[in-house]
Amino acid sequence: MSMDLMKLRKEIFNELGLNSTNSGVYAAEWVKHPSGKKVVSVSPIDGKDIATILAGSKDDFEMIVRKTEKAQNDWLKLTPPQRGELIRLIGNELRKQKENLGKIVSLETGKTTVEGEGEIQEMIDIADFAVGLSRQLHGIQMASERFEHRMYEQYLPLGLIGVITSFNFPSSVWSWNSFIAAVVGDAVVWKPSSKAILTAISVMKIVTKVIKENKYPEIFALVIGSGAEIGNLMSADPRIKLISFTGSVKSGRVVSETVARRFGKTILELGGNNGSIVSSKANLNLSLKGVAFGAMATAGQRCTTTRRIIVEEKIYKEFTTRLKNIYTDVKVGNPREEGILVGPLIDGDAVKNFTRAVDRAKMEGGKLLAGGKTATIRGLKGGFYVQPTVIEMPKVTPITCEETFAPILYVFRYKTLEEAIKIHNAVPQGLSSSIFTNDLMEEEKFLSALGSDCGLANVNTATAGAEIGGAFGGEKDTGGGRESGSDAWKIYARRQTVTINWGKDIPLAQGVRFEV
Ligand code: NAD
């Protein structure tokens, strides 16, 4: 590890109470000797080991479920606003630890410093949202057809829920689910990605310190382990009422089938293949910035990364020439350094996937406009770096229908908006979309039933960079899940329709008579 990274590691290990070997299992306390395999946390910045983690086994998982189920029972004795108070305290602690947590996210996933801190800011934002929500959680009242009857809906806690997270948003996705589920009245078992385990341990250390200090039930548990073992145990376990799964379409399909077999609930937040339409009626400077951010931020490793742009013929030449210049100038390198906008990919496999996708795109008729190669970074001996890449495509081809988790942008051209929307909707995924235009009719068409088929539609802004206030998720192969803001909280509850007869007779609905 380079001197700078060693220094950073030492600093955050002290601040966050991490060691070179850490337990990856928590249920009311850290399990000293979990019986799963060892997992190593590697920094993609230089490819070197950061620490070793002892993962959980089947037995550890069983213990966790029992303990957390019990904690959930105690949690039910608190009112939602009392539950919200815990989340408020956690939000305050996250504010204090934002910088340290941001650093561990950056070291472990290769995000730039601002992106690492942005991830923690998202946790703080969702904590605030959940606190407000804890005083709402409203059902509706309906008119009853029966005399002196009242009907209404209430939302009751589900019980235990499981959250399985991807490496690329290693802490915020957990909080999107957990803080809202907690105010609704649930307890949460978390299985993070094995590529972002120190972040998960650090988050749990902070959160459970607040729980202990304020004597709340231990409603948050952690179990580190593989998807094939622990993830599968979670998906198959009927005591876990809901699995919120964030990850690839391939893994999500397995989870979805397993949970459906036992009639459990799922939130599926799967891969995206997001497109932006750039019209000749757009503000070109703004569109270029939007596309560059959408396609290159987080080294193309966001579910909402812009992977395809569809550019109107009239401005195609000018737009692609200017985009090429931006790609040539952008700074790729150590994400801890000032001015670096594109850091590393997560690991060696991700680099192989990048190279394979570039080769396939070329074989399918693509013409390289920028990048296309792996990159070596001065001052670093290892790490997983690639050049941000732009490939002009003659038409929609098989590779452009796949999500390659890397900064590869495919470019298509169009003559009519109908044609652009057709190209845009031609992929199996349906997460995020955008149009750049100042024309009201184009914008409204894009937002109409004949327009974007995605869960998120943006106008004059990038496909990436969602806020927590809206319900987040996508259609088609993206899985149909919604989480975070708006009324997404309802999935963490069971809906109960209540009918109360406060009269002296028992009239029946639909005019049915039953005289006894
Ligand atoms: P991944 O599918 O490899 O892993 C995600 C999680 O699933 C990990 O915790 C993994 O251990 C677990 N897992 C794998 N197989 C499993 C199984 N059979 N049963 C249970 N759990 C299993 O994904 P990744 O590489 O960590 O993340 C990148 C992917 O996640 C991309 O496709 C990206 O688009 C997607 N993603 C989607 C969203 C969204 O909100 N739609 C957000 C972030 C990431």
Image: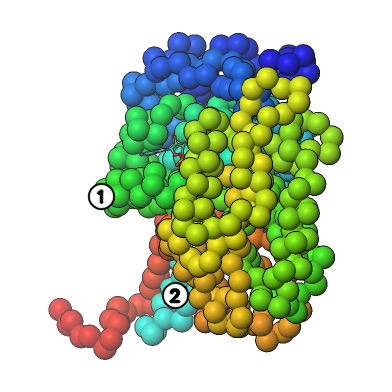
Count of number-bearing discs? 2
User: Percent from the top left, x then y, of residue 88?
Assistant: 70, 42
Q: Is mark 1 within 8 Å of ligand 1?
A: no
Residue nearer the viewer, 510 or 234: 234
Residue nearer the viewer, 297 or 326: 326
User: Percent from the top left, x then y, of residue 509?
Assistant: 30, 82
Q: Three-letter amino acid code at disc 1? A: Arg
> Is residue 468 shown left or right of residue 452?
right
For disc 2, the marked residue is 150
* Residue at position x 60%, y 83% in the image: 416
Q: Taking the image as drawn, is residue 491 in sight?
A: no
The first of marks 2 and 1 along the sequence is 2
For label 2, the crowd category at 10 Å Cα-Cα, with few meaning under 14, some 14 to 19 and many 20 or more, is: some
Residue nearer the viewer, 476 or 506: 476
Quadrant for residue 96, please give it.
Answer: top right
Note whether 449 is above or below 15 in the view shown. Answer: below
For disc 1, the marked residue is 261
The span from disc 2 to disc 1 (Cα, nearest Å) is 36 Å
User: Percent from the top left, x then y, of residue 496?
Assistant: 40, 62
Note whether 48 is above or below 505 in the view shown. Answer: above
Secondary structure at badge 2 equals: strand
Quadrant for residue 347, please give it.
Answer: top right
